[in-house]
Image (cartoon, coloured by chain):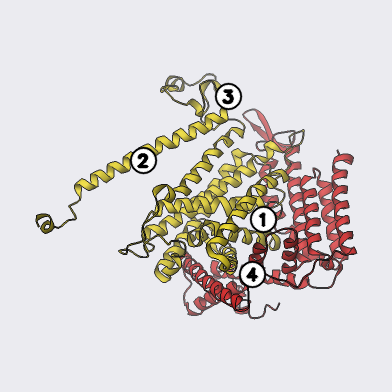
Amino acid sequence: MSTAGREAPAWLLRPEPGLCSCGCVGRRRRGSFLDKTLRGTTVALARVLFDDDEAERDLPLQRVDPAVKIVAAALLLLAAALVHHVVVLVALSLALLGLAAGCGVPAGRLARRVWFTVPAFTAVVVVPATFSFVTPGEVVLPLGTWFGHPVGLTRQGLTAALLLVARVGACLTVALSLTMTTRWDRLLGGARRLGVPRAIVMVASMAFRYLCTLLETVTDLFTARKARTVNPSDATEGRRFVAASAGTVFGASHHLATEVHEAMIARGYTGEPRTLARARVRRVDALWFLGALAAATLALGVDRVVLG
Amino acid sequence: MHIPDGYLSPQTCGALGVAMVPVWATAASRVRRVVTRRFVPGLAVAAAFSFLVMMFNIPVPGGTTAHAVGAVLIAVLLGPWAAVIAVSIALAIQALFFGDGGVLSFGANAFNMAFVMPFVGYGVYRVVAGSTPVDARRRALAAGLGGYVGLNVAALAAAVEFGVQPTWFHTADGTPLYAPFHLAQTVPAMAIAHLLVAGLAEFAVTAGVVAYLQRANPALLTINHHAVAPAAGMAGVEGPVWWVRWRWAVIGLGVMVLATPIGLLAPGGAFGEDAPGDLDLGRYGLRAVPEGLSRYNGFWSHTLLGDYGFGEGQNATVGYLVSAVVGIAVIGVVVAAAVGLVRLLRRRTEPSAVPDEAMVG
């Protein structure tokens, strides 16, 4: 699916020009939060659409049946959630990254998307948990005393923090490996075969498609406003504009839903969606499922039996 | 508030996911019954709308930004059951493609943001909005308040889910296996962030959108308000009986009552609420209980349910539940009496609406 014409204009996405920081040439304006919102949304959605195109490539991982991939991912997620040792979680993440690279998935991009997002945020949030006043235990790095009690970093706190970051990273690696190698419509087809109600699958499928359409409406709103604005608006006015934009988008959504419904009725829709996809489990699917089952069992076995 | 994978134990994720199954089933059934085949595109765009609302970052005092969830807004515009489906699908897209919220923890996120939030918020909205016309200013305020309360209750639910992890899931030496913060830390942290920052964003977006639609497109507000007068001065369809109108508030209060014993899980006691005998004097550098504290402690000892329980401290959970019900009943009686008194006084002071001629004639 081409994204041309759906992205924000390049001039709108370009950052504010960097003038001299001392102010001798001019003052650098802080980017508007509206611009940032638009830029962030467009970039994120463009990335997802790019992934969707990537998932269409004829590579080993992409060829696996989506229903099998969902079950395999669930097994690996469960294993990652039940493991108690950091080293096993790191090994699981590295094995998945290696497998993805071996199957032609850009492992560098996958690693960046995994580790520069939620785990990085988790690492910051979890810092207080390493202190004895949050996680009591054996103080390994004393920082002083509090009413006579030693305070500092505890072994239990540090282990818990590392475990959480490694677990979040491993789970995200599994989830993104699934979505980076499976198109959204195939993923939903797999979910349908696993028992998710037909109506929910159809709503989800259409919602993903309408994201682009609604984002285009939002982009047009922002662009039109920017084209008509001489001075940068303050935050209060910005908030008003956001509320008005959301209201307008809802109106456009409702209008779109009515039109789409009429179009569906005209094409003979009777409430029962039909697809061309046929379920057929092949050898590669069985291998992928058995591989995931073996990996999950191995991870739990090493965690509980070898490492105790 | 999007809980990533790894923060909650698989048991917690499983329990909340299972709890959501009947909610999703009921939502799908009710929405399908109400709007028939048309619900497919309608809900699809509502889900896309919810996704976009979550991407509108709004600046808040302090130099940071917050985003709304939009669950209460969709509940106000399309009904709470539609909000369950729309927000669930938006959360699924976010979890799978943007890494925002986990896949295993999808049930927990849906429980907080697609179930608790729209129902609590919608209950508050219905109570505050009353039977005012669709274009009444009070209705926009009610929507904003619903968004604010709904988001904060959802945040409280998330805080409880985080906070019970280190108590329930840890190794033999006390190392937490999942989120390491206790209830004593998660509840205040989430409360401060959501009461002061994210809640305000939710209020601004929810109230702002409803106010905008009141001015620009009031027809959209009538989708979920068939029994309400379309505009001030116009007679609406006669509303349902009081217990039907207030059912969401009653359900919301019921859920909160059932949740009250959760506090019993928290280790230690509430700060500043220890009995003098329980004080750790050495910790505060004291040799004896301060004289004033001894003198005035127990000044009022005629309590019905001391410490939210029974006299001997037996059946603490039942005691909490009974205390919650009694507390709500007492507050309800006091509020009803106050409202009745105000109405009585207003009726006496207001001039008669019937013209004198009619009275004479």
Question: How far is mark 4 from mark 2, CA to CA?
Answer: 47 Å
Label 3 marks which chain's residue? B
Estimate the spatial distance between the alpha carbons at disc 1 and disc 3, rounded to whole Å: 41 Å
- Vertical placement of residue B104 versus B170, above or below: below
In this image, B147 relative to A104: left or right? left
Report the residue marked by disc 1.
Answer: B101
| Chain assignment, label 4 | A
| For residue B52, side relative to residue B219 (left or right) | right
Residue drawn at x 61%, y 73% as measured from the top left: A15
The chain letter corresponding to yellow is B
Q: Residue at x 66, y 51 (%)?
A: B107
Residue bearing mark 4: A206
Q: Marks 3 and 2: in contact by CB < 8 Å? A: no
Give the percent coordinates (x, y) of residue A302: 88, 44
In the image, taking residue B141 as reference, residue A149 lies left or right, namely right
- Picture coordinates of residue B87, whole percent (x, y): 59, 59
The answer to whether one can see residue A9 in this image is yes
Of discs 1 and 4, which sits in the foreground? 4
- Res. B335 mark: 2
SS at badge 1: loop
Judge if badges 1 and 4 mark residues of a common chain: no
**Colour displayed for chain A in the image of the structure:** red
